[in-house]
Image (cartoon, grey):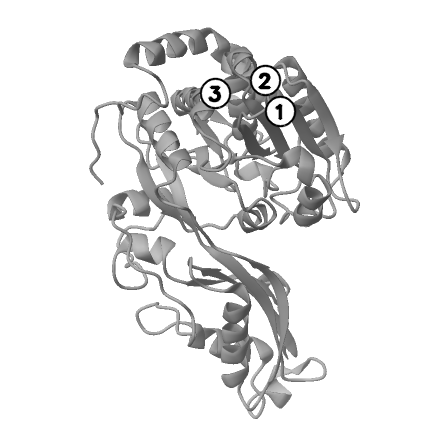
């Protein structure tokens, strides 16, 4: 992808390059405190998954609330619904006739996996070079701190201009946002906005910003294969009966063709994107071993953004070290299907279940347990808010932003659009391809973080040019 290195000239955003430089100079002395506050958040192990201690999630919410109060928010509360994890809402209402911007992030984090696999303890932030390492350092506590820092930078200006700002920091996004929809419906009036900025995505590369304009949706199922009522001796009974692991493997092998393309009939494929992902960068960032071919055909960006992707993400089976000479009677696998914009999750679920049922071996019983679904997202490409965001990103980085898709899913965006249909949703982010969000040694590039904070401040400052009916 080639992009211009000239700053955007967008008077609705900045007025001129001098004001951008002045704002950048004002930001510089705020960054040490912002990074220190981020490190303090990273030290809180706020995993909201079932089975984890909920006290750190509450402590994380309280820390975020204090940060928002310190940034000048007029009204900050910690809320939850239906025994969900605590979320934080901070509000500075708009003056009559002025727009409101809602800033979203989440303060919960993914589990760490085995801490021994990390180069340093996951909840003890460590800076190496220009990167800050720790669970949540990028996803998404850096998003929280981008909002806080932008408000520290231009909050007084926004209040003087009558621009309303609401900050919504969720506490269970990594756990699937189970109470997200009832939460935003219960707090509809407090969260209503003209523009919603979701700071939970990634930039194109270090030094090149991105505006995420499409996201894949999600469907998951657990497929259970049974071949026997109970385990039996593999020598005495093996042959006429194939064990459940073999039968499960045969069924899973039908999900892709010889090229690695998803072979489930009835799934939507979107058009190829206009930008292409560099294969060498993808191989490096994904950790593909040298010499292995990539699955699928066509543009790599299409395989990542606008086509379905189907993965086996878990299997229930005896571990090798505990294996005995018996036929395993029942096995399970969890399948994760990512679906492109234009696909309906319910239709995709029916297509996947139908495929599994049609390919059930006559020598096995197969039961499909339906799991979660999430809608894909496609942004309005040329709204005033989108143009404003592109200009702010270009001014902050000094190079034009890339309109990019994202293979991952943020299903709650569809809920935001349904509950707040008048709002434009802008998906920005603090991550880069080396951030390893959800993975071992997650990290944040500190120079990129500074640019994110500047871009958001520019966007907020420019929001006064938007009206509620055309934002």
Give the camera-side residue of 443 and 116: 443
Q: Which mark is residue 25?
A: none
Q: On the image, which quarter does residue 71 sit in?
A: top right
Left or right: 457 as drawn, with respect to 272: right
Q: CA distance from mark 3 to mark 2?
A: 14 Å
Question: 10 Å neighbourhood of mark 3: few (<14), some, or many (≥20)?
Answer: some
Q: Which residue is mark 1?
A: 41
Which element is circle 2 on?
A: helix
Query: Sequence-wise, which precedes: disc 1 or disc 3?
Result: 1
Question: 10 Å neighbourhood of mark 2: few (<14), some, or many (≥20)?
Answer: some
Q: Residue drawn 45% across and 63% down?
A: 343
Give the camera-side residue of 66 and 167: 167
Q: On the image, which quarter does residue 456 sit in?
A: top left
- Which callout, 3 or 2, points to the residue nearer the camera? 2
Q: Which mark is residue 127?
A: 3
Left or right: 418 as drawn, with respect to 75: left
Q: Residue drawn 42% across and 57% down?
A: 341
Q: Which residue is mark 2?
A: 37
Which element is circle 3 on?
A: strand
Q: Residue drawn 50% across and 39% down?
A: 440
Q: Position of residue 284 (x, y in %)?
A: 32, 43
Screen quadrant of the N terminus? top left
Which element is circle 1 on?
A: helix
Q: On the image, which quarter does residue 339 sit in?
A: bottom left
Q: Position of residue 188 (x, y in %)?
A: 67, 40
Tags 2 and 1 in contact by the CB under 8 Å rule?
Answer: yes
Q: Position of residue 419 (x, y in %)?
A: 61, 47
């Amino acid at each position: 992808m080639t992009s211009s290195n000239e700053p955007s000239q967008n008077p609705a955003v900045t007025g001129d390059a001098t004001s951008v430089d002045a704002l950048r100079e004002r930001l510089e002395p705020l960054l040490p405190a912002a990074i220190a506050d981020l490190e303090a958040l990273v030290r809180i192990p706020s995993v909201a998954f079932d089975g984890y201690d909920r006290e750190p999630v509450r402590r994380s919410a309280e820390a975020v609330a204090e940060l928002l109060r310190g940034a000048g928010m007029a009204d900050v509360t910690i809320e939850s619904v239906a025994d969900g994890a605590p979320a934080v809402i901070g509000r500075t209402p708009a003056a009559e006739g002025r727009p409101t911007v809602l800033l979203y992030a989440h303060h919960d984090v993914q589990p760490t996996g085995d801490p021994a696999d990390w180069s340093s303890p996951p909840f003890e932030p460590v800076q190496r070079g220009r990167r800050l390492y720790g669970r949540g350092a990028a996803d998404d506590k850096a998003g929280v701190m981008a909002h806080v820092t932008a408000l520290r930078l231009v909050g007084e200006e926004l209040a003087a201009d009558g621009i309303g700002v609401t900050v919504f920091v969720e506490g269970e996004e990594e756990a699937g946002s189970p109470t997200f929809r009832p939460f935003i419906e219960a707090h509809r009036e407090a969260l209503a906005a003209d523009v919603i900025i979701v700071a939970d995505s990634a930039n194109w590369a270090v030094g090149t910003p991105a505006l995420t304009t499409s996201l894949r949706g999600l469907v998951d199922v657990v497929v259970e294969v049974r071949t026997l009522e109970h385990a039996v001796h593999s020598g005495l009974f093996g042959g006429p009966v194939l064990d459940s692991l073999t039968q499960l493997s045969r069924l899973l092998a039908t999900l892709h063709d010889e090229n690695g393309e998803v072979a489930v009939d009835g799934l939507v494929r979107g058009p190829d994107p206009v930008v292409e992902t560099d294969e060498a960068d993808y191989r490096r960032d994904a950790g593909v071993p040298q010499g292995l071919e990539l699955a699928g055909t066509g543009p790599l960006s299409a395989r990542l953004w606008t086509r379905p992707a189907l993965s086996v993400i878990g299997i229930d089976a005896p571990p090798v070290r505990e294996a005995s000479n018996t036929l395993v009677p029942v096995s399970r696998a969890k399948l994760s299907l990512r679906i492109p914009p234009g696909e309906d999750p319910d239709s995709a679920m029916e297509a996947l279940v139908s495929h599994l049922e049609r390919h059930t071996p006559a020598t096995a019983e197969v039961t499909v347990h339906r799991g979660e679904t999430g809608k894909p997202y496609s942004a309005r490409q040329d709204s005033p808010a989108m143009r404003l965001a592109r200009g702010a990103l270009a001014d902050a980085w000094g190079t034009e932003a890339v309109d990019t898709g994202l293979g991952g899913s943020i299903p709650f965006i569809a809920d935001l659009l349904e509950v707040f249909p008048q709002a434009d949703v802008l998906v920005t982010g603090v991550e880069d391809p080396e951030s390893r969000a959800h993975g071992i040694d997650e990290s944040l590039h500190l120079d990129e973080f500074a640019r994110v904070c500047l871009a958001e401040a520019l966007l907020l400052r420019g929001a006064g040019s938007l009206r509620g009916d055309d934002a």
